[in-house]
Image (cartoon, rainbow, N blue to C red):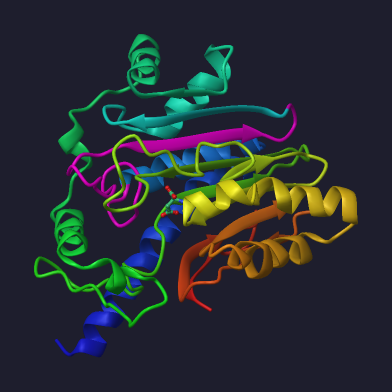
Amino acid sequence: MSRDGAAAEQQAAYHAALLAVLGPPQDLLARGGSALDAVSLAVDLLEDCPLFNAGHGAVFTHDETHELDAAVMDGATLKAGAVGCVSRIKRPVRAARAVMEHSEHVLLVGAGAEALAQRLGLEMVSPDYFSTEHRREQLRRVLATDKAVLDHDGAALQFRSPSGPTPPLDEQRKFGTVGAVALDAQGNLAAATSTGGMTNKQPGRVGDCPVIGAGTYADNRTAAVSCTGTGEMFIRAAAAYDVCARMAYAGASLAQAAEAVVMQALPAIGGRGGLIAVDRHGNFSMPFNTEGMYRGFARVGEAPQTAIFR
Ligand code: ASP
C-alpha cells in the first residue's frame, strides 16, 4: 500500500474508534441519562481502545511499568473523585468514580486506590494488561533519543512503528490522554479524564489528569472541561479551572475562555496540548496548540462528528 494509502487507513481507524465511542453515550443521553454516566461510559470505552493512551494501550514509565491516572467530576454537586499511579485497575475511571461515591476523599493513589477498587469489586488486572508492543517501542525510542531531540518544538520526529502503521498524529508531539465532557437534559455538566501519563515519566509522577482544577473540572454554573497535554504546565496553570473562572469572573464565553487558556496562558509557560469543554448552554470548544487532537462530538438526534487535524 502507498504511504498515502496507509495514512488514510490509519486516519479512518481513529475516526471509526471515535465514532464507536460517541454512539453509546449519545444513546444514553437521548434516553434521559445523566452527564455523569455519559462521560463515565465514554471514558470506559476509550480506556478499552488500544489506540489511545489510557487503560489498555497506556504509555510506559521510565522503568517500563504503567502508572495510570483518572478523574471524574459532577458539575451539579462539585463532587469529584480521582486516582493516581494505579497499575492494576482495569478501568481507572471507574475507580475515580468509586472514590467520589464511596469514600470521603477526592484523590487516592497507588496501593490505597487499588485496595478500594478491589474492595468494591472493580475488575482488577495484571499490569501487563495495559501493555502494547507499540507503546513499548515508543518507550525504547524515547529512551534511545537524546533530550534535545525530544524537545517538542524541535525537528519533526514522526514515530514509525516497525510493528504497525504510523498513527496520523506524530506520537512525539501529541498527547493521548482520553477525556469526555457532557451536558444532559437536566442541565447538568460532567467531565472525566483518564491517562497513562507521559512516556518515560519518572515512577511516582502524577500529571494533571487527576488533579481537580488542572486536568479535569466541571461546574454547572460555567462548564465541564477535560485536558490533555504537558501535565506539569496544566497543573501550574490550573488550566481546567481557569476556563471556568474566566467565564464566572470575567464574563468570557466558553470559546473565549478556552482559547485564552490553550493559546495564551499555557504557551506562556511552555504548556502544550488542548482541551475539550462544554458549557451549560451546550456550546462546546475543543482548542489545541499542537498539530492535531483526536476528538469528536455528538448532539442528541444528530450524527456524531469526529476530527483529527485543525
Ligand atoms: N496530560 C497527561 C499527563 O501529563 C498526558 C497527556 O495528555 O497525554 O499525564
Position above or below: 183 against 15: above
In depth, the one of 152 and 76 nearer the eye is 152
Q: Position of residue 153 (x, y in %)?
A: 42, 76
Q: Give the magenta-colored segment's residue range.
A: 49-77
Q: Residue furthest top?
A: 119
Residue at the image point whose x is 31% and y is 37% from the top = 67
In the rendered view of the protein, which quadrant contains the N terminus?
A: bottom left
Q: In this view of the protein, which residue sits in the foreground, 244 or 154?
A: 154
Counting from the top left corner in percent of width and height, residue 236 is at 59, 48
Q: Magenta span has 74?
A: yes
Using residue 294 as the reference point, say whether residue 302 is left or right of it.
right
What's the magenta bit mostly, secondary-structure-wise? loop
Picture quadrant of residue 112: top left
Q: Could you tell me if residue 279 is visible in this image?
A: no
| Residue 5 x, y percent position in the rendering | 24, 86
**As drawn, 24 above or below 104:** below
The answer to whether residue 109 of the structure is visible from this angle is: yes
Residue 177: percent from left, percent from top: 43, 52
